[in-house]
């Protein structure tokens, strides 16, 4: 039984495509197909059910997954143990754009201080790209919004709920239970980004049959925040972006829980059974706690 054949099987399982597995392994599709068929002959079972071009896991294939993962993991651990490296072990961390801007500048130095023996490589990308890089083993751990994939484990880490924020001395600061009609009359800045469900905010005004006074439509968090800080509008922004300003009193959060909840979280995600450094994981959790206790300067 060849470890390369087993790896080809697991790449097809994770990526759900022979084409994508071939790209990730830098192999041709016929080569990946041949490796899987050889593995099936060695095992004496069909790992996949084939119908035309479609490929689905058989029951035997599903049952074999944890054993294949364990064999590959044991092989990789043994290879690392026997291989003498002059360079420090490298940990590749990925994060979506907002986490990259506001949490990672705090987390990386924190982790490096706790693990001087490690070299940290960082990649900033969209959630979809990060998922692909996780599945292709180009990233060890990624910070991103909630995802659902059978090959990925995820853990909720950071609260990034969207808040309505205004500048100090705004009229909303002294009001309780503002109405949607009152909100619609205010000059607003809207930050539009695929990472958040902004359609819910638009729907809020639509259902109330009022038109919001959107004077600025931007796709950059810092631009949106600067407009609010300069008292030229108010707006909904994710918590990580305004954490420091809220703590310093430079921005004020207005409670809108009586008509909308915009809960968002950042998750840490990694391949099943692939992240074996328990101490590093503990320090990642600790870095989150320390981050939540401190005011973090935003560049």
Image (cartoon, rainbow, N blue to C red):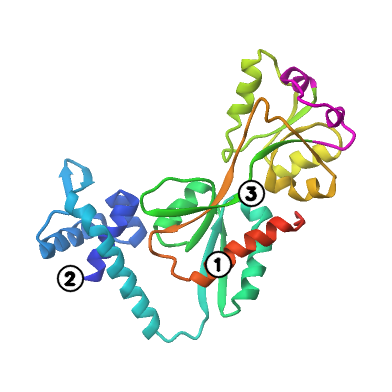
Q: Which residues are magenta?
A: 166-185
- Give SS at disc 3: helix
From this view, report whether residue 85 is shown above or below residue 144. Answer: below
- Mark identifier at residue 98: 3
Relative to 146, residue 71 above or below: below
Is residue 66 among the parts visible in the rendering?
yes
**Residue at screen point 63% across, 17% down:** 206
* Nearer the camera: disc 1 or disc 2: 1
Image location of residue 114, percent across then percent down: 62, 75
**At numbered mark 2, what does the secondary structure look like: helix, strand or loop?**
loop
Would residue 181 be counted in the magenta stretch? Answer: yes
Label 3 to label 1: alpha-carbon separation: 23 Å
Identify the secondary structure beneath mark 1.
helix
Q: Nearer the viewer, residue 43 or 59?
A: 59
Q: Is residue 46 above or below residue 168?
A: below
Upstream in sequence: badge 3 or badge 1: 3
Residue depth check, mark 3 versus mark 1: number of the one nearer the observer = 1
Q: Quadrant of residue 210?
A: top right
Q: CA distance from mark 1 to mark 2?
A: 36 Å
Q: Which residue is mark 1?
A: 282
Dot 2 corresponds to which residue? 1
Looking at the image, residue 201 sits to the left or right of residue 172; the answer is left
Q: What residue lies at 30% left-to-right and 67% top-to-bottom?
A: 70
Mark closer to the chain start, 3 or 2:
2
- Quadrant where the C terminus sits is bottom right
Residues at circles 3 and 1 in contact by the CB criterion of under 8 Å: no
């Amino acid at each position: 039984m060849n470890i390369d054949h087993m790896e080809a099987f697991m790449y097809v399982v994770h990526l759900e495509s022979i084409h994508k597995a071939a790209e990730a392994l830098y192999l041709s599709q016929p080569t990946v197909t041949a490796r899987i068929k050889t593995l099936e002959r060695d095992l004496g079972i069909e790992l996949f059910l084939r119908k035309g071009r479609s490929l689905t896991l058989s029951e035997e294939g599903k049952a074999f997954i944890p054993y294949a993962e364990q064999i590959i993991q044991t092989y990789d651990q043994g290879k690392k143990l026997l291989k003498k490296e002059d360079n420090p072990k490298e940990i590749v961390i990925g994060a979506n754009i907002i986490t990259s801007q506001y949490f990672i500048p705090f987390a990386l130095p924190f982790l490096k201080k706790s693990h001087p023996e490690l070299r940290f490589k960082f990649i900033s990308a969209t959630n979809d790209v990060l998922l692909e890089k996780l599945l292709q083993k180009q990233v060890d751990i990624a910070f991103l919004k909630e995802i659902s994939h059978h090959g990925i484990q995820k853990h909720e880490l950071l609260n990034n709920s969207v808040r309505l924020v205004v500048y100090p001395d705004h009229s909303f600061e002294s009001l309780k239970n503002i109405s949607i009609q009152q909100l619609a009359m205010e000059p607003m800045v809207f930050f539009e980004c695929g990472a958040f469900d902004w359609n819910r905010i638009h729907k809020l005004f639509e259902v109330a049959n009022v038109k919001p006074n959107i004077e600025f439509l931007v796709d950059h968090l810092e631009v949106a925040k600067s407009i609010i800080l300069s008292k030229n509008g108010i707006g909904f922004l994710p918590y990580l972006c305004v954490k420091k300003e809220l703590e310093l009193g430079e921005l004020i959060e207005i409670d809108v829980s009586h008509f909308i909840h915009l809960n968002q979280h950042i998750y840490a995600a990694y391949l099943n059974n692939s992240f074996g450094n328990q101490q590093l994981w503990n320090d990642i959790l600790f870095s989150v706690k320390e981050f939540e206790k401190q005011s973090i300067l935003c560049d």
